[in-house]
Amino acid sequence: MGSRMAYRTCPLCEALCGLELTLDDSGTVTRVRGDRDDPLSKGFICPKGATLGRLDADPDRLDTPLLRRPDGSHVQAPGWDEAFEVVRHGIRKVAERYGKDSVAVYIGNPTAHSIAGPLYGAAIIKALGTRNVYTASTADQMPKHVSCGHMFGDPLAIPVPDLDRTDHLLMLGANPLESNGSLCSAPDFPGRLKAIRGRGGKVTVVDPRRTRTAALASEHVFIRPGTDAYLLMALVRTLFAEDLAEVPAHLAGRVNGLDDLRALAVDFTPERVAPVTGIPAAAIRRMARDLAAAGRAAVYGRIGTCTQAYGTLNSWLVDVLNVLTGNLDREGGAMFPRAAHMPAYRRKRPFTTGRWVSRVRGLPEVNGELPVATLADEIETPGEGRIRALITIGGNPVLSAPNGARLDPALDGLEFMVSVDPYLNETTRHADVVLPPPRPVQTPHYDLALLPLAVRDYVRYSPAAVPLPAGRPAESEILARLAVLASGLDGDPAALDEMVIAATLGKAVASPGSPVQGRDPDELRKMLTDDGPASLTEQRLDMMLRLGPYGDGFGAVQDGLTLARLRDDHPHGLDLGALKPRLDEVLCTASGHIELCPPSFAADAARLRAALDDDRDRDPAQMLLIGRRHLRSNNSWLHNVPELVRGSNTCTLQLNPEDAERLGIGGGDVVRVVSRSGSLEAVAETTDTVMSGVVSLPHGWGHDRPGTRTEVARKHAGVNVNAVTDENEIDPLSGTAVFNGVPVTLEPVLAPAAPAASPRAEAEGAGTATAG
Ligand SMILES: Nc1nc2c(c(=O)[nH]1)N[C@H]1C(S)=C(S)[C@@H](COP(=O)(O)OP(=O)(O)OC[C@H]3O[C@@H](n4cnc5c(=O)[nH]c(N)nc54)[C@H](O)[C@@H]3O)O[C@H]1N2
Ligand SMILES: Nc1nc2c(c(=O)[nH]1)N[C@H]1C(S)=C(S)[C@@H](COP(=O)(O)OP(=O)(O)OC[C@H]3O[C@@H](n4cnc5c(=O)[nH]c(N)nc54)[C@H](O)[C@@H]3O)O[C@H]1N2
Ligand code: SF4
Ligand SMILES: [Mo]
């Protein structure tokens, strides 16, 4: 048998590694290696990327649409057209009867790694006209969007640490040695951290666990879960108190709110926050001084700081520190990447939130969506505007949403549900229709959502390595068809792309500063077809690149980027250089200044201030639950790859040996974990890497539900930690779930739990942990 190579970006995490695939004549992947010619990843690969072939060929991966039968089982649909007809009927019936808000959309994490999600997700929402939009963002990074939205005017203007040039990195709530980085795309994050130390710099990690990242750092500081905002405020206060805070020359005259901020921070002395955070006052002062003294420093906070009761304050204070130490928009500091597909001339409206509120809990809209923490309320609560139908796209909220266990039965109460997903899993088993996207090797790749977060300006396009069989829709086509049928019109999905292209070109020719200002849009449209990209999706990408900061401006810039040049001349990707200062392009607040102390943040800081006093009377019996990521997991959906569920990737409840002894729990014991919202049973693992008073359980497990089709995952079921996380606890400014610092109590379970879910655990949405 012959073999050939294909090159593509790994679609699995935010590190954007280039992969070299070896394929046989049948299009099966026989080997995966890191692509050594990729200028950003330089051959780096992790175990997940290395098993992409196994994922691609997973026998449980769906290839044809499924329909749900009345008994809850699923059968193959007669064909794609028939499946779309069922969807059309299901959605229209609900929308016509109950109104447009009765159809909800949930968009999950993998859509941020696809071309289809960013290009067509919004079209579906628009076509439905629904306000019931939910995504994994409110279980993740929404606080950062809100923080950047208010500080810089644009929720997508997220500064990333300039890892390769910084001398000092202060990292909170991130574990890139397992996650490979997030809101900071940096293949070989571990190597880049080692390089900081190698050039004499310092890496400090703040985390309630001594993670592998903490072990690699120069210094690890344990922090009590949920208390980062106190630490960050105390750092800000120390900078002011010791005259270490100054607006640097390059930001002079561009910063509002310095005095308000100083006044706000005054109560948060290191001594006052020390008992709450568990960090000695002297250590806090030293952290502030180190940060101020470092030549080039960056503060970086990730999911550990976002999924907290003060997620937005944390995200904000991280960038406040970057400003006050002179490191924002400066080499080696925190910088704004310039993505090749994002035009700089686009003028944005200043950011606001709360344009509408959720029906049941009155929670404000943020970025056009509502908190996933209230999805179950909106499905279960009777009355006008109740959700009766749901579209999920690449999401598994039963395992990923706060108290997702409550969603499990709630989804069964829907009148109609359709899922775009390659697996029949804990969420999609409730769907009346499942529409599977093609295999990864059959899917072209361009990181629309993640390239704007890369640590160098970089761009890569990977065409599909294996062509789609005739009649097999790409995910873009699936989503485009959903958008068209959701609009209630009969139409050609191609019309949607044409509409977007016409609108974008129309705006571009009218925009001052655009490379095509004043030109004829029809002429530009024709260039997109003539210059080669095959599909309309590719033409849209081509258009974006050509209008972007590195683009050819439709012929205006010699040798500028086009999709064809990127694809044909740079199959391993193209390095566009180190990050460049570009605050002018980014800043779009109403004032035109960086807002250091937005009023809504100041108001929430009052809540933080009040809690500082409450925090004194903590119940010592209560443990605080946090999450955990393992290198070989990816949220809920890679547990069906045998190589990835071997060895140390287990769903155990980690706790400190001191706590274990106090509570009479031994390693390997089954423990009942009880919270306000539910309970579960898990196997204990004692380890001093977890600080005392804290327990850690990973998310994305609990694969023991009936009616799923993931046979490997079923054998390594684990438990759903989101049976005990609390949907009532959110960061109020962003609506983001509080996954870290969930108060729980532990009870030893006398008899080992049965291997399959007991009826009681079943009712509570919890299974039994496997240690295998
Ligand atoms: N292998 C693997 N990689 C992944 C994923 C995966 O599931 N597995 N998921 C991907 C996704 S969707 C995301 S968003 C990213 C996330 O990427 P990261 O943000 O790096 O995620 P984690 O590894 O969960 O690291 C979060 C850290 O925060 C710590 N923490 C918990 N509570 C607190 C707290 O209160 N304060 C502080 N300071 N720290 C706290 C945890 O102990 C943990 O070490 O990873 C992505 N990459
Ligand atoms: N307790 C706790 N809960 C958490 C977290 C935590 O740290 N602790 N982390 C949160 C975070 S950061 C995130 S991002 C969320 C993730 O939340 P979700 O996005 O809801 O969950 P995933 O497990 O990523 O589910 C991804 C789904 O997409 C499907 N899929 C895979 N590839 C494709 C594709 O190419 N196209 C389509 N259409 N579907 C595909 C998979 O089969 C799976 O069903 O979980 C959150 N939940
Ligand atoms: S680090 Fe992320 S992008 Fe790189 S190979 Fe692993 S999963 Fe893929
Ligand atoms: Mo995430």
Image (cartoon, helix red, strand yellow):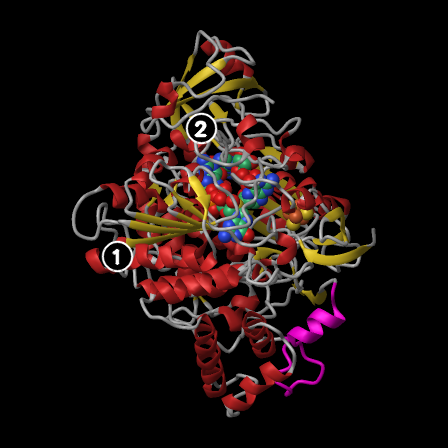
Which residue in the protein does label 2 denote?
Answer: 625
Q: Residue at x 66, y 26 (%)?
A: 647
Range of magenta residues: 550-571
Mark before the other along the chain sequence, 2 or 1: 1
Graded by Cα atoms within 10 Å as few (under 14), some (14 to 19) or many (20 or more), the crowding at tag 1 reads some
Give x and y (percent) for residue 584.
Answer: 52, 73
- Residue 287 in view in this figure: no
Give x and y (percent) for residue 714.
Answer: 53, 29
Is 164 situated left or right of 223 in this image?
A: right
Which residue in the protein does label 1 denote?
Answer: 93
Residue 379 placement: quadrant? top left
Is 418 situated left or right of 295 in this image?
A: left
Along the viewing direction, whichever of 733 and 755 lies nearer the viewer? 755
- Would you place residue 594 above or below residue 267 in this image? below
**Label 1 secondary element:** helix
Give the amino acid at mark 1: Lys
Q: How many numbered circles are shown?
A: 2
